[in-house]
Image (spheres, rainbow, N blue to C red):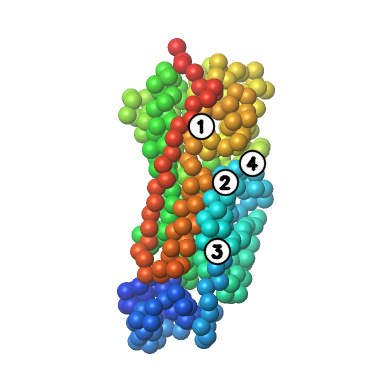
Amino acid sequence: MAVTIKDVAALAGVSPSTVSRTCKNHPSISRETKERVRRAIEQLGYEPGFQAEQTEEPISRTIGMILPPSYRESFENAFYLEAIRGISQFCNQHGYINTVITGQDDKEILGAVTAMVKSGKVDGFIVMYAKQNDPIAEYLYNEGLLYVVIGKAHKFANQTVYIDNDNVLAGQEATEYLIQLGHRRIAYLGSDSNLIFSADRKNGYQLALMQNGIPVEPRYIAETQFLPEELGMQIHDLLEGEDRPTAILVSDDLFAVALERACIEAGLSIPGDLSIISFNNSLMARLTSPPLTSIDINSVQLGYEAASQMINHIENPNLMATKIIVPHRLVERHSCREYK
């Protein structure tokens, strides 16, 4: 079996990214660490790939920001814009530049990331989403590249730097809020559970129901990608029938806007016939009619902390992987009311 960068890292007692930067003779690695890694490379007979360089190179001071694969939703979702604002703010303060990487699918994004790595003009990547079995995160890990995830790492969690909210707790608290208003028929409308934040928010929703003796009804749970036709069908299924929910927890303001539009078309008033609580507290939540009660996940702070950790690990490569939880808060507006 071929020797991998992880084998070298384990023998040398460092991270794979430290091995990668030692192979590139990166100036941020101490002489002592370089010698230890090189002894491990020689002992194991490891042959570095295309990342290895023979000459000393300065830190490029460039960070790649990887958006999820999408035709359009990433550019319409205010969460990513706010997180990028936080990243840019910290980078500007510390003399780093950043560049956005995205594409229509994982293959296109992976090609762009690989090209940047080969150019040697990037110090690390901020992956601005977390999903199960993500080939981008797996590539970054296997190549020993430095990366930070905004969200909860699915694989290699102990070796991954990530910045997240406690989405289980946030989903639980949002559902508890509706329960305290007297609602018992509470539905959940969210993204595909392949996205970890949505899966966690749904888990919090289910936990709150069970803790309050309310059965979890599968027919009240709708999960979909943000595709207009599919989303429309899911919303229609939730709203039809005499025992339709009296309140809906929505995983994202984008979905909540689509839900409000569907309610108008169905002749349902908000919050008279249906209470809605959503996530992100974006501009859309404030501009809808009525304005949405929403969980503010502090998107700018998530980006700011991700950039902070990225630069800290670039300049201090022997640090252990850090996990940071950014607090959330409930912002009450006019889309929820007591149910009697």
> Label 1 vs label 4: CA separation?
22 Å
The residue under the point 62% across, 58% down is: 100
Identify residue for label 4. Answer: 227
Residue, disc 2:
82
Q: Secondary structure at mark 3?
A: loop
Q: Which residue is mark 1?
A: 294
**Among the two numbered marks 3 and 4 on one chain, the one whose residue lies closer to the N terminus:** 3
Q: Position of residue 300 (x, y in %)?
A: 52, 46
Badge 1 or badge 4: first in the primary sequence? 4
Image-quadrant location for residue 328? top left
- The disc labelled 3 sits on which kind of residue? Gly
Q: Earlier in the sequence, mark 4 or mark 2?
A: 2
Instruction: Count up the numbered dots.
Output: 4
Q: Name the mark nearer the viewer: 2 or 3.
A: 3
Of badges 1 and 4, nearer the viewer stands 1
Q: Are marks 4 and 2 in contact (CB under 8 Å)?
A: no
Q: Earlier in the sequence, mark 2 or mark 3?
A: 2
- Residue neighbourhood size for the residue with mark 2, other residues' Cα within 10 Å, grouped as few (<14), some (14–19), many (≥20): many
Of badges 4 and 2, nearer the viewer stands: 2
The residue that appears at 36% across and 79% down in the rendered structure is: 33
Which label sits in the foreground, 3 or 1? 3
Q: Position of residue 144 (x, y in %)?
A: 45, 71
